[in-house]
Image (tube, rainbow, N blue to C red):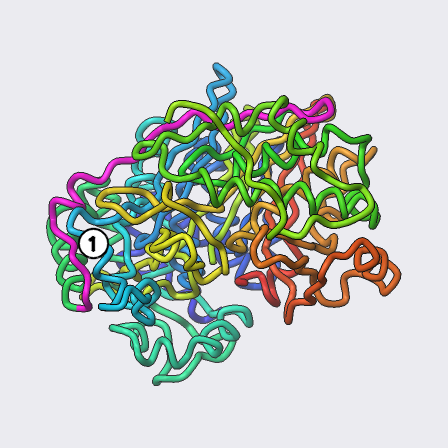
Amino acid sequence: MNCISKWFSGRARALAGVEAVLLVLCIALAGAARAAAAPAGAAIASAHPLATAAGYEMLRQGGNAFDAAVAVAAALAVVEPYSSGLGGGGFWLLHRASDNHQVMLDARETAPAAVTLAMYLDGSGKPIAGATLQGGRAAGIPGAPAGMAQLAQNYGRLPLARTLAPAIALARHGFPVDPRYARIARLRERFLLNGVNTARTFLAGNQAPQPGYLLRQPQLALTLELIARHGRDGFYRGRVAQALVAAVNATGGAWSLTDLENYRVVERAPVRISYRGATIITAALPSGGGVTLAQALNILEQFPPVDARDPAGAHLVIEALRRAFQDRALFLGDADFVKVPTAKLTGKSYARSRAATIDPAAATPSDRLAAAVVNESGNTTHYSVIDADGNRVGATLSINFLFGAGVVAGDSGVLLNNEIDDFSLRPEIPNAYRLRSGEANRIEPRKRPLSSMTPTFVEDARGVLVLGAPGGSRIISQVLLCILDYVNQREVDLRRMAAAPRYHHQYSPDRVEIEPDGFPAEWRGALEARHHVLHITGRKWGNMQLVFKSKTGGATQAESDPRGQDIGWY
């Protein structure tokens, strides 16, 4: 606890409200984060106890769920730099209780104006190794800082100087890295050594730090302070913007100051789904998650209620995912650039036609699944928040792969994303998640790449569930399985829902991925008898964050994925 006492000196004392924040952070660092009881009627679940503690402190200081969401996002940018950060983007799904206003803040990264396909393909049309994954070419224009600023300005009660104070303190004075950070840094040690300013920022003497190492990021603290004082202009103009452009262009990219100045968060109507008495509100395009989730649920609703944990039910879930992911690849992209038949794809009648192609006794090979005809014109983190008033936030944020593009921009402390990998170079070229997409998702200037991030609300007679997870294309199947488990439960058991074993299918490659040690031989045999090809992955995946508020008495629950401390980064 010696490091904590230093937080109460000098500049830290001058930050608005920081003494109270640091007291909560001390509790978390002492290994007793759960002892910092949530304010009555509120619940927060995030991937790190320091971020959760920062969010609760905003509620104690009179803020609402939206203020807490800003504090959690900023703190995660400091303590989980491998998953999210100021150099990335994401989606905030919001519900404002006073008027039942529901909206998705789209803070997804955009391609720079000067981007060309030739930057990523060689003379023979083949992908240039690493071009979409490492260095300046891999980075899209970040949206996270603009998203936090808009969330605070339009929905919160507290100024950014207050909500960013915990993150500023964590960055300047440091935090002891946990075993999870140490494992990920060791896994990516060579990548960080070969990156730009990454070794000195995230390693200890050019080696992965041991648990307990005090990681300080003073340059990131200065950038956060600029945002606290100047809002979005503290990031998208001036010194930070200049550092970002210089770093990207020195490592193969093609950014301009105008790209940053012109970046805008877009407020979008979320996707709305009805499923067996539950109303589901989820992410809109450019997230492919909401449309894909809607299709899968609508297909499953054409059959009697299924237990997704039973082999017969799992077979139907897999076949629904197969068809929904096929349509994701064929039709989905940034709706500001391409005409996407969203209403058709999310409709019940379309689902009936897709469900009619499912054989309850056998898998449909993906290469034999006929493409639907639609005739119409035309590595991530998640957290969940509910406050006492019923405001709620589900946020999924990302820099894509672990430690993003491997570039810390100059003296800004900002680690850049590698979200360009989520665009389609050509339909036959999968991205790093083996996920294919088509012409609708081809790379274009100022376009937002298709995403799998799927922050979601589920509401029924029992209450409201807020959920989401990291995991690339597996996010969608994680959210689907959790919804099915929730609907099938009489009593809401968040722990069981978070811990339940997972499986996944995404049309191509044609295989069912299953977690190791998650399914007994009898279950696997029943799926194989239906001609499914099973692939047991090397590790479990996901780091789901769940909160629930009961409609009877307003009691709340929060639960984090037990996988998080071991493999939640995957």
Answer left or right for 174 relative to 520: left
- In this picture, is 323 found above or below 514? above
Q: Residue 355: give x, y in percent of width and height.
A: 69, 33
Task: Say whether residue 274 is magenta.
Answer: yes
Secondary structure state at the residue bearing disc 1: loop
Residue visible at 72% across and 39% down in the picture: 358
Q: Residue 29: give x, y in percent of width and height.
A: 53, 62
How many other residues sit within 10 Å of disc 1, few (<14), some (14-19) or many (≥20)?
Answer: some
Query: How many numbered tags mark residues here?
Result: 1
Which span of residues is magenta-colored?
Answer: 251-278
Residue visible at 26% across and 44% down in the picture: 228
Q: Residue 410: give x, y in percent of width and height.
A: 18, 66
Q: Is residue 380 visible?
A: yes
Q: Amino acid at mark 1?
A: Thr
Name the residue furthest right.
522
| Residue linked to disc 1 | 116
Quadrant in the rendering for residue 61: top left
